[in-house]
Image (tube, rainbow, N blue to C red):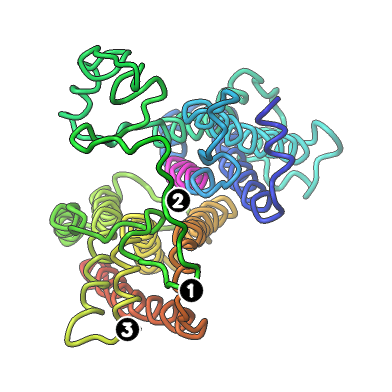
Amino acid sequence: MLALRLTWAARPAVQLRRLLVALASAGTGFLLLCTLGHAIHHPEDPSGAVLRLAWCLTPLAATVHFALAVARSDPGTRPRPGLAAIGLGPARLMAITATTTALSCTLGSMLALLFFLHLRGDLTGTPFDGAASDFLAADAPLPLPAALTLLGLVPAIASVTVGLVLRPRDDRPASARRDARSYGRFGAYGRTTASEPFGAYGRFRARRSTSEPAAPEDETPAPADENQPADLGQDSALPPAPQEAPKGLPWGIAVLAAGLAVESYANRHGTAPATPLPGGLAGTPSVLVGWLLTAVGLAVAGPGLTHLCGRLLQSAQPGALRLLAGRVLMTEAARIGRPLGIVCAVASGAYTMTTLYDPTGPEVGPLTTLGLLLVTSCALATLLTAAVEAKHARSDTTAALLRLGAPSTMLRSAAALRAGALMALFGPLTLVVAELAALPLTG
């Protein structure tokens, strides 16, 4: 009930993102139901049904990734002071977020089921004069347990993924965690005093350094001077300065090179496809494996490339504008780098698929078009959601800069500079990867 109340009480922008998750879940559920319909209509071809089900994994992964991005950007389920006192700790909020994600995906799955039953003619007459009977199996009864099992994949996988990623973590070093366990329930080494009845950590684990003497209770801090500008270095609300680059850049480059190498040997032994591609596409299984490796490599290398882009912005005697833009990129590299890499992978894959298309073969069907639109839309929506999350995460920094007198035009110029730098780096990279992937197939 609490998850439902938080869902209905959210702002319109949050509700819009949840509605987009429901639509993505509906598209993926419809593709899964069409796979079931094809299996019912063609019982003599089980391998074809398994192949179509395997092709649905890409839209499923894109939908789950988008649902995770929306769950992370939901402001209603973030830990806030005072919520733990009423039983809403980090674990409870994580469970509420996973439940909200499951509700959104379940709504989309129900919409997919209703639309599928409408096309089959189970609710009304068969539309389109039965033109889609090949993947609807309108002349055969629909096995309801199998349909519900397929429709439950998206809500189950999305909620479990959100729960695993957003689970509470103890970010303290291992030595600090061991010391905290050895201190016991009543403070440091179990010692209690009259002034500290619960030890150095206290009953509510209020961390205070034992090396510094405690301040007298009657001593009050001096009031802060409102005319004195705030010290950005001492503001605990500001994000910490990035210390090191993400460590996935070498691995991402290695996986990307492996994917391009696999694609370069795609047609060495002929062009007859051992595993047919949907929608009149031609190729071999090595093309698919190479594209998957390329996509994984771009996704893994995305944060490192974003961090490198921010570092390059700050090189060669930068001014305040380039320093601000570069530092923000370095801080947000882990948040927006991976969705940006996935968008580049989808763009390069779309270019490769246009090269693989066989004009003499059948036209691209509606299910193939739906799958491509679903994957592309989810990738772009995930990137935009990550950008919104990054903007909210640096809201304290933006407010501090405005208090110090920074003009708002400078902040907008820094945002435009960040966007231009990312496009200047990832745009040519996407084109190069797409050309290298399609070169062996056009020669």
Mark 3 lies on a secondary structure that is helix
User: Looking at the rendering, in which quadrant would you find the N terminus?
Assistant: top right
User: Residue type at mark 1?
Assistant: Asn
Q: Which quadrant of the structure image shows residue 198?
A: top left
Residue marked by disc 1: 227
Callout in the foreground (3, 1): 1
Please name the predominant secondary structure of the magenta segment in the image.
Answer: helix
Q: Is residue 442 magenta?
A: no
Q: In the visual, does 363 lie left or right of 440?
A: right
Mark 1 lies on a secondary structure that is loop
Q: Nearer the viewer, residue 85 or 61?
A: 85
Q: In the visual, does 43 lie left or right of 333?
A: right
What residue range appears in magenta? 56-68
Q: In the visual, does 210 lie left or right of 421?
A: left
Residue marked by disc 2: 278
Q: Which quadrant of the structure image shows residue 270?
A: bottom left
Label 3 to label 1: alpha-carbon separation: 24 Å
Residue marked by disc 3: 320
Q: Residue at x 57, y 53 (%)?
A: 370
Mark 2 lies on a secondary structure that is helix
